[in-house]
Image: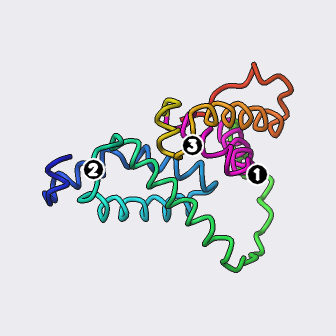
């Protein structure tokens, strides 16, 4: 990372490629759709490039980059809310077209459920269950106390289980990565 911080374009390219999939995954769950996730992730990568020379290493690069990506996605969500919504007439699928397989349908349902969580709960749940950050890293990323992280994750998972129709949160599985 030191080489990337000091202008080595090859090292910067490698650093961004190494972290892209994880950042995109977080952006996808935070934003709720592929288009906004792609835009948010692109903005995050640009912000990382711009901010890298000033990165002081007090936080790990991973934690810092998740913070940048989370902020970029939240900005994208705010921009999305200001955009006009286009309504398209879509034809009904023909009866002989194959239906989504169950796994894809479950993923769509899970994505919709995560998107319905309030932001205060969605971000810690995504950072824990999608990004795999520990509680201290999430606290640092979101700049909130670790106890708040724990309670928001617990409350977010409980709400997610309710949204998905699961009345027993202990049966709930972690979000698929």
Left or right: 42, with 107 as reference point:
left
Magenta span includes 74: no
The span shown in magenta is 103-131
Q: Which mark is residue 96?
A: 1
Residue with the mark numbered 3: 144
Most common SS among magenta residues: helix
The residue depicted at 36 percent of the width and 42 percent of the height is 59
- The x and y percentages for residue 124 are 60, 40
Left or right: 159, with 31 as reference point:
right
Label 1 CA crowd tier, 10 Å (few <14, some 14–19, many 20+)? few
The residue depicted at 68 percent of the width and 37 percent of the height is 152
Label 2 CA crowd tier, 10 Å (few <14, some 14–19, many 20+)? few
Residue contact between numbered discs 1 and 3, judged by CB atoms under 8 Å: no
Residue 33 versus residue 75 in the image, above or below: above
- Of badges 1 and 3, nearer the viewer stands 3
Q: Earlier in the sequence, mark 1 or mark 2?
A: 2
Residue with the mark numbered 2: 56
Quick one: SS at disc 2? Answer: loop
């Amino acid at each position: 990372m030191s080489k990337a911080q000091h202008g080595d374009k090859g090292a910067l390219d490698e650093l961004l490629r190494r972290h892209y999939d994880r950042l995109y995954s977080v952006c996808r769950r935070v934003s709720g759709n592929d288009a906004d996730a792609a835009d948010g992730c692109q903005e995050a990568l640009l912000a990382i490039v711009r901010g890298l020379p000033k990165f002081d290493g007090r936080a790990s690069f991973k934690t810092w980059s998740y913070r940048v990506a989370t902020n970029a996605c939240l900005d994208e969500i705010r921009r999305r809310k200001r955009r006009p919504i286009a309504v398209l007439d879509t034809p009904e699928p023909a009866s002989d077209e194959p239906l989504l397989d169950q796994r894809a349908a479950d993923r769509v349902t899970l994505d919709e459920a995560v998107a319905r969580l309030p932001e205060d709960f969605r971000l810690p749940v995504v950072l824990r269950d999608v990004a795999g950050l520990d509680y201290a890293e999430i606290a640092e990323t979101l700049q909130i106390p670790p106890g708040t992280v724990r309670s928001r994750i617990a409350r977010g998972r409980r709400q997610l289980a309710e949204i998905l129709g699961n009345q027993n949160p202990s049966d709930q599985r972690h979000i698929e990565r």
